[in-house]
Amino acid sequence: MKITATAVTNTGRRTNNEDSYLVADELRLYAVADGMGGYAGGEIASRLTVEHLEAFVARNRRDAAGTWPCKEDKRLSFAENLLRAAVTQAHQAIAAQRHGELEYMGSTVVAVLVEGKKAALAHVGDSRIYRLRGGALALLTRDHSLWAELEAAGLKPGERAGFPHKNVVTRALGIDTAHRPDLVTVDLEPGDRFLLCSDGLHDPLDEAALRRLMSGDCEGLVKAAYDAGSSDNITAVLLTVTG
């Protein structure tokens, strides 16, 4: 499958941009990271995330026998194991710098690694991956957030938009006890569109708006989120699958 990728990031109403994205067409690897932990910490954490994802996958392509930061999980595909190892390496890089002014930094991440007619997906935190197929929108990740955990437990915290702690994440890279990625593999079909985005994009837009906007481009998605009142950095990576 051929993948066409575009990406846009915007500081939005913030004074600095703590989001980073990765479009590595030669590796067929794509990612969005949303940093946290103060003015400098968030920027550094998200940058470390995408840099180490790219570096680890690139090194594996050059030398498949190289050392991995975690053991292979026999239940996972090779692509899922590769993403898991790359995310683990990014986590370790952030954790190693968590001291002084950077003590509280961390990052979310969503990543897609394309292998043939399939794509492995990884995510940590509340950045998201959506798929638009034949006009139907599907959310392919479940937020690692306080709101999502309460909802999953059946406590029904109400609508996410009105929940006062909606931006509290329960997993993030750099946090030793809470960095494990969720992994899944999906089939690819010609015409599929995948959106990787930070919460600054998906927070202010409902599913109907996302479904309509994903037929367009990244610029339209980011502008719509800003116009809808997003108070965060806004980042989108849009992938189009062709035969």
Image: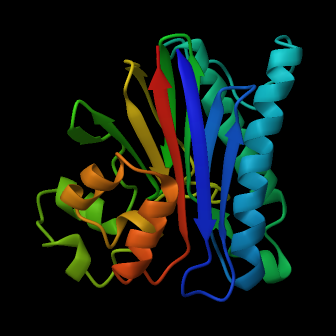
Give coordinates of residue 13: x percent, y percent: 54, 87
Give coordinates of residue 88: x percent, y percent: 68, 40
Residue 50 against residue 84 in the figure, above or below:
below
Q: Which residue is drawn at the image coordinates 16% and 72% (left, top)?
A: 159
The image quarter containing residue 105 is bottom right
Residue 148 against residue 159 in the figure, above or below:
above
Left or right position of 90 against 106: right
Q: Is residue 138 visible?
A: yes
The image quarter containing residue 56 is top right
Left or right position of 64 against 142: right
Q: For the image shown, how many numbered marks are present on the structure?
A: 0
Give coordinates of residue 69: x percent, y percent: 76, 32
Give coordinates of residue 101: x percent, y percent: 81, 83
Query: Please, which colouring scheme is shown?
Result: rainbow
Residue 224 against residue 40 in the figure, above or below:
above
Left or right position of 9 against 55: left
Q: Which residue is drawn at the image coordinates 22% and 56% (left, top)?
A: 207
Residue 168 against residue 80 in the figure, above or below:
below
Q: Can residue 80 be seen in this view?
A: no
Q: Which residue is drawn at the image coordinates 24% and 42% (left, top)?
A: 137
